[in-house]
Protein backbone atom coordinates (compact mmCIF):
# COMPACT_ATOMS: atom_id res chain seq x y z
CA UNK A 1 0.00 0.00 0.00
CA UNK A 2 2.99 2.29 -0.48
CA UNK A 3 3.36 4.00 -3.88
CA UNK A 4 6.58 4.01 -5.85
CA UNK A 5 8.67 7.17 -5.66
CA UNK A 6 7.61 10.16 -7.75
CA UNK A 7 8.21 13.87 -8.20
CA UNK A 8 5.48 16.44 -7.60
CA UNK A 9 4.77 19.62 -9.56
CA UNK A 10 1.86 22.02 -9.00
CA UNK A 11 0.73 23.70 -12.22
CA UNK A 12 -0.36 27.32 -12.00
CA UNK A 13 -2.10 27.35 -15.36
CA UNK A 14 -3.18 25.11 -18.21
CA UNK A 15 -0.08 26.17 -20.14
CA UNK A 16 2.18 25.14 -17.27
CA UNK A 17 0.44 21.78 -17.03
CA UNK A 18 0.88 21.18 -20.76
CA UNK A 19 4.53 22.20 -20.55
CA UNK A 20 5.12 19.64 -17.78
CA UNK A 21 3.38 16.91 -19.77
CA UNK A 22 5.53 17.70 -22.81
CA UNK A 23 8.68 17.80 -20.69
CA UNK A 24 8.14 14.44 -19.01
CA UNK A 25 6.22 12.56 -21.70
CA UNK A 26 4.54 9.33 -20.63
CA UNK A 27 6.20 9.47 -17.21
CA UNK A 28 3.85 12.25 -16.06
CA UNK A 29 0.28 11.92 -14.82
CA UNK A 30 -2.22 14.64 -14.03
CA UNK A 31 -3.65 14.86 -10.53
CA UNK A 32 -7.08 16.47 -10.06
CA UNK A 33 -9.26 15.12 -7.22
CA UNK A 34 -7.06 12.04 -6.84
CA UNK A 35 -9.84 9.57 -6.03
CA UNK A 36 -8.91 7.25 -8.90
CA UNK A 37 -5.19 7.85 -9.37
CA UNK A 38 -3.97 7.79 -5.76
CA UNK A 39 -5.51 4.40 -4.87
CA UNK A 40 -4.04 2.98 -8.08
CA UNK A 41 -0.63 4.34 -7.08
CA UNK A 42 -0.86 2.79 -3.62
CA UNK A 43 -1.58 -0.57 -5.22
CA UNK A 44 1.21 0.09 -7.76
CA UNK A 45 -1.18 -0.31 -10.63
CA UNK A 46 0.02 3.15 -11.64
CA UNK A 47 3.62 4.30 -11.16
CA UNK A 48 4.01 7.80 -12.61
CA UNK A 49 7.45 9.36 -12.36
CA UNK A 50 5.92 12.82 -12.03
CA UNK A 51 2.58 14.00 -10.65
CA UNK A 52 1.38 17.26 -12.18
CA UNK A 53 -1.20 18.73 -9.81
CA UNK A 54 -3.91 20.70 -11.66
CA UNK A 55 -6.43 20.63 -8.82
CA UNK A 56 -6.27 24.39 -8.21
CA UNK A 57 -6.81 25.54 -11.79
CA UNK A 58 -10.03 27.50 -11.26
CA UNK A 59 -10.19 28.28 -14.97
CA UNK A 60 -11.25 24.66 -15.57
CA UNK A 61 -14.12 24.64 -13.07
CA UNK A 62 -17.36 26.03 -14.53
CA UNK A 63 -20.78 25.22 -15.94
CA UNK A 64 -22.35 27.51 -18.53
CA UNK A 65 -24.96 27.47 -21.28
CA UNK A 66 -23.39 28.01 -24.69
CA UNK A 67 -26.04 28.20 -27.39
CA UNK A 68 -27.72 24.81 -27.67
CA UNK A 69 -25.01 23.17 -25.55
CA UNK A 70 -23.87 23.07 -21.95
CA UNK A 71 -20.12 23.50 -21.42
CA UNK A 72 -18.63 21.90 -18.31
CA UNK A 73 -15.04 22.54 -17.24
CA UNK A 74 -13.00 19.41 -16.65
CA UNK A 75 -12.28 20.31 -13.01
CA UNK A 76 -15.93 20.81 -12.12
CA UNK A 77 -16.66 18.68 -9.06
CA UNK A 78 -19.37 16.05 -8.83
CA UNK A 79 -20.97 18.11 -6.07
CA UNK A 80 -21.33 21.12 -8.37
CA UNK A 81 -22.83 18.92 -11.08
CA UNK A 82 -25.51 17.58 -8.76
CA UNK A 83 -26.51 21.08 -7.57
CA UNK A 84 -25.89 23.44 -10.49
CA UNK A 85 -29.11 25.01 -11.88
CA UNK A 86 -27.88 24.96 -15.50
CA UNK A 87 -27.16 21.23 -15.24
CA UNK A 88 -30.51 20.63 -13.55
CA UNK A 89 -32.42 22.45 -16.29
CA UNK A 90 -30.57 21.42 -19.43
CA UNK A 91 -28.72 18.11 -18.71
CA UNK A 92 -30.45 16.62 -15.66
CA UNK A 93 -29.15 13.15 -16.49
CA UNK A 94 -25.66 14.37 -15.59
CA UNK A 95 -26.89 15.55 -12.18
CA UNK A 96 -28.68 12.24 -11.60
CA UNK A 97 -25.46 10.31 -12.23
CA UNK A 98 -23.28 12.68 -10.19
CA UNK A 99 -25.40 12.40 -7.06
CA UNK A 100 -24.97 8.60 -7.07
CA UNK A 101 -21.17 8.80 -6.83
CA UNK A 102 -19.58 7.92 -3.50
CA UNK A 103 -20.35 10.13 -0.51
CA UNK A 104 -20.30 13.93 -0.01
CA UNK A 105 -16.53 13.93 0.62
CA UNK A 106 -15.87 12.13 -2.64
CA UNK A 107 -18.30 14.32 -4.59
CA UNK A 108 -16.70 17.50 -3.26
CA UNK A 109 -13.20 16.44 -4.38
CA UNK A 110 -13.80 14.28 -7.44
CA UNK A 111 -13.98 15.96 -10.86
CA UNK A 112 -15.80 15.07 -14.05
CA UNK A 113 -12.63 15.38 -16.12
CA UNK A 114 -10.67 13.14 -13.77
CA UNK A 115 -13.41 10.51 -13.85
CA UNK A 116 -13.66 10.51 -17.64
CA UNK A 117 -9.91 10.59 -18.25
CA UNK A 118 -9.43 7.64 -15.87
CA UNK A 119 -11.72 5.74 -18.28
CA UNK A 120 -12.94 3.15 -15.81
CA UNK A 121 -15.51 0.93 -17.57
CA UNK A 122 -17.76 1.20 -14.48
CA UNK A 123 -17.67 5.01 -14.09
CA UNK A 124 -21.11 6.58 -13.59
CA UNK A 125 -20.44 9.85 -15.39
CA UNK A 126 -19.15 8.03 -18.46
CA UNK A 127 -22.59 6.47 -18.96
CA UNK A 128 -24.30 9.86 -18.72
CA UNK A 129 -21.89 11.55 -21.13
CA UNK A 130 -22.28 8.68 -23.62
CA UNK A 131 -26.07 8.77 -23.47
CA UNK A 132 -26.00 12.54 -23.94
CA UNK A 133 -23.71 12.29 -26.99
CA UNK A 134 -21.15 14.47 -25.29
CA UNK A 135 -17.99 15.82 -26.87
CA UNK A 136 -14.75 15.95 -24.90
CA UNK A 137 -12.37 18.81 -25.62
CA UNK A 138 -8.65 18.09 -25.31
CA UNK A 139 -5.80 20.58 -25.46
CA UNK A 140 -2.21 19.74 -26.33
CA UNK A 141 0.88 21.06 -28.13
CA UNK A 142 -0.90 20.74 -31.49
CA UNK A 143 -3.87 22.79 -30.31
CA UNK A 144 -7.44 21.91 -29.37
CA UNK A 145 -9.35 18.91 -30.65
CA UNK A 146 -12.84 17.55 -30.00
CA UNK A 147 -13.41 13.86 -29.31
CA UNK A 148 -16.93 12.39 -29.44
CA UNK A 149 -17.71 10.43 -26.29
CA UNK A 150 -18.25 7.28 -28.35
CA UNK A 151 -14.63 7.46 -29.53
CA UNK A 152 -13.04 8.58 -26.26
CA UNK A 153 -12.96 5.30 -24.35
CA UNK A 154 -10.58 2.86 -26.04
CA UNK A 155 -10.02 0.14 -23.42
CA UNK A 156 -9.99 -0.59 -19.69
CA UNK A 157 -8.67 2.66 -18.16
CA UNK A 158 -7.51 3.76 -21.59
CA UNK A 159 -8.70 6.78 -23.53
CA UNK A 160 -8.06 8.63 -26.77
CA UNK A 161 -6.10 11.32 -24.88
CA UNK A 162 -2.44 11.54 -25.90
CA UNK A 163 0.21 11.56 -23.17
CA UNK A 164 0.79 15.29 -23.69
CA UNK A 165 -2.90 16.27 -23.82
CA UNK A 166 -5.16 17.69 -21.12
CA UNK A 167 -8.94 17.24 -21.03
CA UNK A 168 -10.28 20.77 -20.57
CA UNK A 169 -14.02 20.69 -21.25
CA UNK A 170 -17.06 18.49 -21.79
CA UNK A 171 -19.75 19.78 -24.16
CA UNK A 172 -23.25 18.33 -23.91
CA UNK A 173 -26.35 19.01 -26.03
CA UNK A 174 -28.97 20.76 -23.90
CA UNK A 175 -31.67 18.16 -23.32
CA UNK A 176 -34.01 19.89 -20.88
CA UNK A 177 -37.63 18.73 -20.88
CA UNK A 178 -36.83 15.25 -22.24
CA UNK A 179 -37.13 12.02 -20.26
CA UNK A 180 -34.02 10.54 -18.66
CA UNK A 181 -33.02 7.95 -16.05
CA UNK A 182 -29.93 6.64 -14.32
CA UNK A 183 -29.90 3.24 -12.60
CA UNK A 184 -27.06 1.19 -11.15
CA UNK A 185 -26.47 -1.79 -8.89
CA UNK A 186 -23.57 -1.93 -6.42
CA UNK A 187 -22.68 -4.66 -3.95
CA UNK A 188 -22.21 -2.17 -1.11
CA UNK A 189 -22.87 1.50 -0.56
CA UNK A 190 -20.20 3.69 -2.23
CA UNK A 191 -18.89 0.80 -4.36
CA UNK A 192 -18.32 1.08 -8.08
CA UNK A 193 -21.31 -0.12 -10.07
CA UNK A 194 -21.48 -3.79 -10.95
CA UNK A 195 -23.70 -2.65 -13.82
CA UNK A 196 -25.24 0.74 -14.52
CA UNK A 197 -27.42 2.28 -17.21
CA UNK A 198 -28.12 5.82 -18.38
CA UNK A 199 -31.13 6.54 -20.58
CA UNK A 200 -31.80 9.79 -22.42
CA UNK A 201 -34.70 10.45 -24.79
CA UNK A 202 -34.00 12.52 -27.89
CA UNK A 203 -35.93 14.97 -30.03
CA UNK A 204 -37.95 12.97 -32.55
CA UNK A 205 -38.62 10.13 -30.13
CA UNK A 206 -35.29 8.29 -30.28
CA UNK A 207 -33.77 6.99 -27.06
CA UNK A 208 -30.10 6.58 -26.13
CA UNK A 209 -29.09 3.81 -23.72
CA UNK A 210 -25.56 3.63 -22.28
CA UNK A 211 -24.12 0.86 -20.11
CA UNK A 212 -21.26 0.60 -17.63
CA UNK A 213 -19.80 -2.60 -16.20
CA UNK A 214 -20.72 -4.52 -19.35
CA UNK A 215 -17.45 -4.50 -21.26
CA UNK A 216 -13.88 -3.18 -21.38
CA UNK A 217 -15.27 0.33 -21.90
CA UNK A 218 -18.50 2.20 -21.21
CA UNK A 219 -20.71 1.48 -24.22
CA UNK A 220 -24.04 2.11 -25.92
CA UNK A 221 -26.69 -0.61 -25.90
CA UNK A 222 -27.13 -0.38 -29.65
CA UNK A 223 -29.50 -3.36 -29.94
CA UNK A 224 -31.88 -1.82 -27.40
CA UNK A 225 -31.74 1.58 -29.12
CA UNK A 226 -32.48 0.06 -32.52
CA UNK A 227 -35.35 -2.01 -31.16
CA UNK A 228 -36.93 1.02 -29.51
CA UNK A 229 -36.52 3.05 -32.70
CA UNK A 230 -38.33 0.28 -34.61
CA UNK A 231 -41.28 0.48 -32.23
CA UNK A 232 -40.51 -2.49 -29.98
CA UNK A 233 -42.08 -2.02 -26.53
CA UNK A 234 -39.60 -1.24 -23.77
CA UNK A 235 -40.64 -4.40 -21.91
CA UNK A 236 -39.35 -6.44 -24.85
CA UNK A 237 -36.42 -4.26 -25.89
CA UNK A 238 -34.80 -4.62 -22.46
CA UNK A 239 -34.06 -8.29 -23.22
CA UNK A 240 -31.47 -7.09 -25.77
CA UNK A 241 -29.46 -5.14 -23.19
CA UNK A 242 -26.48 -7.52 -23.20
CA UNK A 243 -26.39 -8.13 -26.97
CA UNK A 244 -23.03 -7.09 -28.40
CA UNK A 245 -21.52 -6.64 -24.92
CA UNK A 246 -18.58 -8.44 -23.34
CA UNK A 247 -19.47 -8.43 -19.63
CA UNK A 248 -16.48 -9.38 -17.49
CA UNK A 249 -16.51 -12.59 -15.47
CA UNK A 250 -14.64 -12.02 -12.21
CA UNK A 251 -14.86 -12.11 -8.42
CA UNK A 252 -17.28 -9.18 -8.39
CA UNK A 253 -19.89 -10.80 -10.64
CA UNK A 254 -20.15 -13.44 -13.34
CA UNK A 255 -20.79 -12.42 -16.92
CA UNK A 256 -24.23 -14.08 -16.87
CA UNK A 257 -25.19 -12.19 -13.72
CA UNK A 258 -24.09 -8.90 -15.27
CA UNK A 259 -26.16 -9.69 -18.36
CA UNK A 260 -29.19 -10.30 -16.13
CA UNK A 261 -28.55 -7.06 -14.24
CA UNK A 262 -28.30 -5.13 -17.51
CA UNK A 263 -31.71 -6.38 -18.59
CA UNK A 264 -33.30 -5.57 -15.22
CA UNK A 265 -31.75 -2.10 -14.97
CA UNK A 266 -32.52 -1.16 -18.58
CA UNK A 267 -36.10 -2.21 -17.96
CA UNK A 268 -36.30 -0.03 -14.86
CA UNK A 269 -34.73 2.96 -16.59
CA UNK A 270 -37.01 2.72 -19.63
CA UNK A 271 -40.05 2.55 -17.34
CA UNK A 272 -39.26 5.91 -15.71
Image: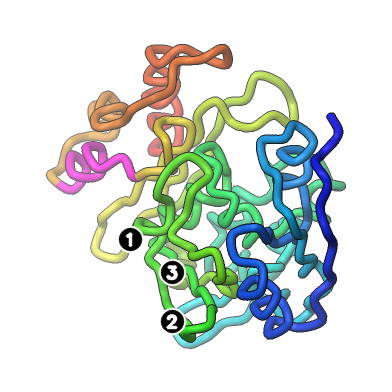
177 relative to 101 in the view: left or right: left
Q: If you read the primary sequence from the N terminus, does the residue marked by circle 1 or circle 2 appear first?
A: 2
x and y, in percent, of residue 187 in the image: 65, 19
Q: Nearer the viewer, residue 66 or 233?
A: 66
- Give how far apart the Cα atoms at labels 1 and 3 are: 16 Å
- Span highlighted in magenta in the image: 220-229
- Give how far apart the Cα atoms at labels 1 and 2 are: 14 Å
58 relative to 264 in the view: left or right: right
Question: What is the quadrant of the N terminus in the image?
Answer: top right
- Give how far apart the Cα atoms at labels 2 and 3 are: 13 Å
| Mark 1, residue position | 202
Above or below: residue 125 compared with residue 56? above
Q: If you read the primary sequence from the N terminus, does the residue marked by circle 2 or circle 3 appear first?
A: 2
Of badges 1 and 3, nearer the viewer stands: 3
Element type where label 2 sits in the image: loop
| Mark 2, residue position | 68
Element type where label 1 sits in the image: loop
Q: Residues within 10 Å of mark 3 (few under 14, many from 20)?
A: many
Q: Please name the predominant secondary structure of the magenta segment in the image.
A: helix
- Residue 9: quarter of image: bottom right
x and y, in percent, of residue 72 in the image: 60, 72
| Mark 3, residue position | 135
Amino acid sequence: MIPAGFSYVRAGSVQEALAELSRHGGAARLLAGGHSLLPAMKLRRAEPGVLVDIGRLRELSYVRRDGDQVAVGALTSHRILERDPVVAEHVPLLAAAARRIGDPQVRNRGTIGGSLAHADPAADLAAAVLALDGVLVARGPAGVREIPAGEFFTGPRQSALAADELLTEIRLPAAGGLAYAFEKFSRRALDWAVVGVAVQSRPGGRTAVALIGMGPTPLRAVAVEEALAAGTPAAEAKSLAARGCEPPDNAVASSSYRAHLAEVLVGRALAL
